[in-house]
Amino acid sequence: MAALVDMLEAVDHVDEMLAGLSRQAFEEDRTTQRAVERCLEIVSEASRRLTAEQRRQDPDVPWRSMADMGNVLRHEYHRVAASVVWSTARSLGDLRPVLLRLIADARGARPTAP
């Protein structure tokens, strides 16, 4: 369950960092870009720790792409465009309800409203 919590914390941190920030402001702020990239790496690495059963519960989530994104950020960092980081980060909010449900399932409880 720790991986799910790590993912949720990273998703929430990205939401906090991007709140009220325009794409242009993001692309001009290398510090925020790097912080968001780090959160994406955490989401990527933690997604690799989920069980096959957890991933099967939500087959529409691009689990493989999520894992692959971390490889790109770590090994192809010189080719990562801020626009790709922005669009990926903005889509993380869709993952939040999935994570809340998986965490609740792991705890043996029903999820609360996001």
Image (tube, rainbow, N blue to C red):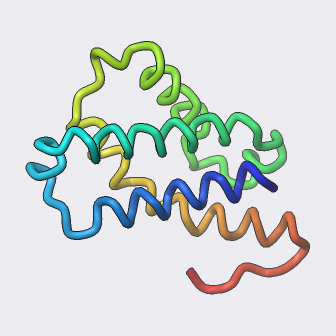
Q: Position of residue 86 (x, y in %)?
A: 27, 45
Q: Answer with left or right where residue 75 lies relative to residue 87.
A: right
- In the rendered image of this protein, does residue 61 appear above or below residue 44? below
- Residue 50 coordinates in the image, percent (x, y): 76, 43
Name the residue at the right extreme. 108
- Left or right placement of residue 9 versus residue 79 in this view: right
Asked if residue 103 is positioned above or below residue 40 in the image, the reply reads below
Q: Could you tell me how many numbered marks the image carries?
A: 0
Residue 108, horizontal then vertical, whole percent: 90, 73
Closer to the camera in the image, 83 or 54: 83
The answer to whether 7 is drawn above or below residue 73 in the figure is: below
Judge whether 99 appears above or below 2 on screen. below
Q: Residue at x 21, y 38 (%)?
A: 30
Of all residues, the one furthest to the front in this rendering is 31
Q: Residue at x 58, y 69 (%)?
A: 97
Q: Quadrant of residue 83?
A: top left
Task: Locate residue 20: give its quadrant.
Answer: bottom left
Q: Image quadrant for the N terminus?
A: bottom right
In the picture, the quarter occupied by the C terminus is: bottom right
Which residue is at the far bottom? 113
Residue at left offset 65%, top offset 47%: 59
Image position, residue 7 (x, y; %): 61, 52
Q: Residue at image x 78%, y 53%? A: 2
Residue 33 sits in quarter: top left
